[in-house]
Amino acid sequence: MKKLVALMLVGAMTAAMVTGCGSSADTSASTDAAAEDTAADAEATEDTAEAAEDTAADAKSDLTYVKEKGTLVVGITEFEPMDYKDENGEWIGFDADMAKAFAESLGVTAEFQVIDWDNKILELEGKTIDCVWNGMTLTDEVTSAMECTNAYLNNAQVVVVPADVADQYQDEESLADLTFAVEAGSAGEDEVEARDLAFNSVTAQADALMEVEAGTSDAAVIDLLMAAAMIGEGTSYSDLTYTISLNSEEYGVGFRKGSDLAEELNKFFAESYEDGSIQKCAETYGVQAALIEQ
């Protein structure tokens, strides 16, 4: 009997020890799991905080961004009378002068960056420039990809040919057999493509004029305002002239989509029109007849 009782006591103690060991293992496992959960929660919180910081940075207004860095980087091509260099290598022109004045009103400095016109949207999105201000036609492609200002100048795309054959190209039907030089990504390129005319794409409108001058293209399609300033008597292209207009269009300035700088510039245009400074600038560069009331 005593032996039976002793055996029963040993069994009970063994069971208790087994139970005790099991509880310790469970507690340890639970503690490890809780620690892992805490670490995961902390990592998730950190990721959320970083995402919030990124969102806040993305949401920062372009106006604030430009003021903080102290510069307004203007994407341009060489395009007289809008943006071109004077004898001292300084950028001048109707657009260049207005860009400088706008930058000054913001308390920053205008910097001019020559761009590949065909990549202007990528340049904006990549923040290598802050705006495209270069006699830019407000096409559907432009207005859908950029935050654009109100139109400020009227324009047209015109056909440029050697002056000695100009009388042969006075209507659209006469253009069918010509090969045109046009700036890649320009409104001029759009016009010749729409008419299924043969063309060569070049980097800038000035290059299109050089093509016609050299005889490597029969004609060019460029902006009317540029043609009026750069070809004909008293210019570097005195033996070229323009004949017919292919469209009518308007210029605007483009910023990144959603940018608050577009509305800021609209206000500046309105103020400049009211005080007469934009009219004076237009007269300086001979584009006053194309100016749109703001």
Image (cartoon, rainbow, N blue to C red):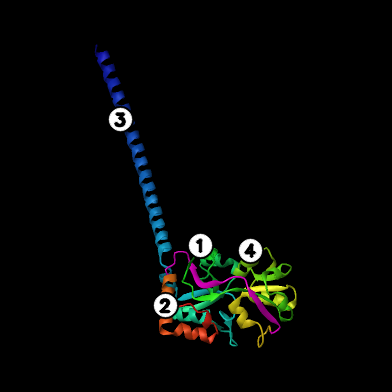
The span from disc 1 to disc 3 (Cα, nearest Å) is 72 Å
Of the numbered discs 3 and 2, the one sitting upstream in the chain is 3
Q: Is the residue under label 3 in contact with that under label 1 (CB below 8 Å)?
A: no
Q: Amino acid at mark 2?
A: Ala
Q: What residue did someone put label 2 on?
A: 270
Quick check: is 64 in the magenta stretch?
Answer: no
Identity, as a three-letter code, of the amino acid under mark 4: Ala
Which residue was labeled with disc 4?
194
Q: Nearer the viewer, residue 71 or 151?
A: 151
Q: Secondary structure at mark 3?
A: helix
Q: CA distance from mark 3 to mark 2?
A: 84 Å
Q: Nearer the viewer, residue 205 or 114?
A: 205
Q: Residues within 10 Å of mark 2 (few under 14, many from 20)?
A: some
Badge 4, how many Cα within 10 Å: few under 14, some, many 20+? few
Quadrant location, the C terminus: bottom left
Disc 3: CA contacts within 10 A as few (<14), some (14-19) or many (>=20):
few
**Start and end of the magenta stretch?**
238-260
